[in-house]
Image (spheres, rainbow, N blue to C red):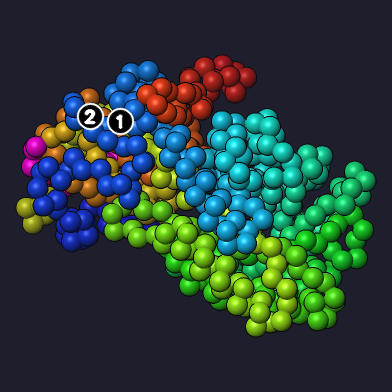
Amino acid sequence: MRAHPAGPLHADVASSHESVARPATPAALNHLSSAVWPASARRNADGAIEIGGVDVRDAVAAHSSPLFLFDEDDLRSRARRYRDAYVGAGARLVYYAAKAFLSTSVARWVTEEGLGIDVASGGELAVALRAGVPGDRLLMHGNNKSVEEIEAAIAAGVGRIVVDSFEDIVRIADAAGRAGVVQPVLVRVTVGVEAHTHEFIATAHEDQKFGLSLSTGAADEAVRRIAKLPSLALVGLHSHIGSQIFDAAGFQVAAARVVSLAQRLWDEQGIEVEELNLGGGMGIAYVDSDDPLDVADMAFQIGDIVGKECAAAGIPLPTLAFEPGRAIVGPAAITIYEVGTVKPVELDRGAVRTYVSVDGGMSDNIRTALYDAEYTVTLASRESSAEPVLCRVVGKHCESGDIVVRDAWLPGDLAPGDLLAVAATGAYCRSMASNYNYLPRPAVVAAAQGRLAVLLRRETLDDLLALDPGA
């Protein structure tokens, strides 16, 4: 994709008015949709938002802003819901996505709720192990795993390593052989199915870095090579068709193709595929118009699809595994910002856009700039009855593309010092955060029953300077 650094719709007021519906009344700006906000989100008697019984003003007073605020009970509840739905649909294990957000506390929470964790680096593996997650509940991904990462995974007794290339086979087999173990592996199959999602996060079409192609025979060849190696045990196949998926249609085609490979392996090589990991990438609601399928409905439909495909192919139904991705952690957190500058900008045709600058930006949420992602934002420290104005919430970085929420209606009396809350920022915001412009990364805290707990402390300038030997 080629785009202006500021992204599409930059300074395009006409398109903005058409795509972002004006609230019916000023009071509608104060509403918190249950589809978008954490389960405990409410406005208290002062009109301020509370999460887990904690007023956002108190959270910021204690931990400054920007601030990621998690609803612990909501995250745990979502973990249980996915565990129950997908285990009920035939899954051996449901894996939490470490890449979405990881801390030792979150790793413990999801493990306590019965999930495994999929990791994609030595760092993520180290956090999970430090949290006490048993090795057999971990799955390791990666298109370019280092020898050190593979050795660490094998030493930890990781339950599954996903083979992503022929080089992977050699490295994993060698490391397992030297360790004197037989390492269970899955072969990641590129099935040529692209989910209806953003180009950069759709991962199953042919022209991309992940997996071994089904159409070229690379996946078949990988299985043949693994079968000859005594230090590896093929336990199944892995497929992942994308992210932010709202229905089961893509899984229908992907499952048919993976089951076809499983049938061929049985007929030609006598190899039974015992486990089928269909990935996941289940979607969440970032804005009211997003309409993801109910968790239980999605699980039932995918399980039914696999069952029918295996029956038609005449092969035993494999044990299933799933990786829901952002769906467990994404909706469970918000980001709180303090408003700094409010700048109305007159454009052509008499239009005005109000630029609302906050104390964070693309260093704590790169997704808007990277994926043109949409978010819901609201005034969080009070309610307002002022008339709505069309705003663009922007960060403080030296980039015209430093946009948090491209187009949103906010109260016309918005002022410096107000707090804004952006919903559904639990996934891929703090985990993709940077120190651009030497901004320390925000703290991450969790609220439950009126109390706050620190998951990751705020970075300081001393933390950043500690990396500089000349400082």
Is 243 placed left or right of 17 in the picture?
right
Check the image and report above or below for 194 versus 171: below
Give the image location of residue 274, x and y in percent: 75, 65
Image quadrant in which you'd find residue 452: top left
Label 2 crowd bin: few (<14), some (14–19), many (20+), radius 10 Å? some
Label 1 crowd bin: few (<14), some (14–19), many (20+), radius 10 Å? many
The residue closer to the viewer here, 361 or 272, is 272
Give the image location of residue 38, x and y in percent: 36, 41
Residue at 8% x, 57% y: name it. Answer: 349
What is the spatial separation of the Cα atoms under label 2 and label 1, in whole angstroms?
Answer: 7 Å
The C terminus, quarter of image: top right
Is 312 placed left or right of 30 in the picture?
right
Judged from the image, the secondary structure of the residue bearing numbered disc 1 is strand
Magenta span contains residue 391: yes
The residue closer to the viewer here, 294 or 345, is 294
Residue at 52% x, 62% y: name it. Answer: 299
Mark 1 or mark 2, which is nearer the start of the sequence?
2
Magenta span: chief secondary structure:
strand
Is 140 placed left or right of 418 in the picture?
right
Give the image location of residue 188, x and y in percent: 69, 63
Q: What residue type is labelled 1?
A: Glu
Q: Where is mark 1, residue-wise?
A: 50
Whether residue 377 is visible to the viewer of this picture, yes or no, is yes
**Which mark, residue 44?**
2
Image quadrant in which you'd find residue 332: top left
Judged from the image, the secondary structure of the residue bearing numbered disc 2 is loop
Is 240 placed left or right of 420 in the picture?
right
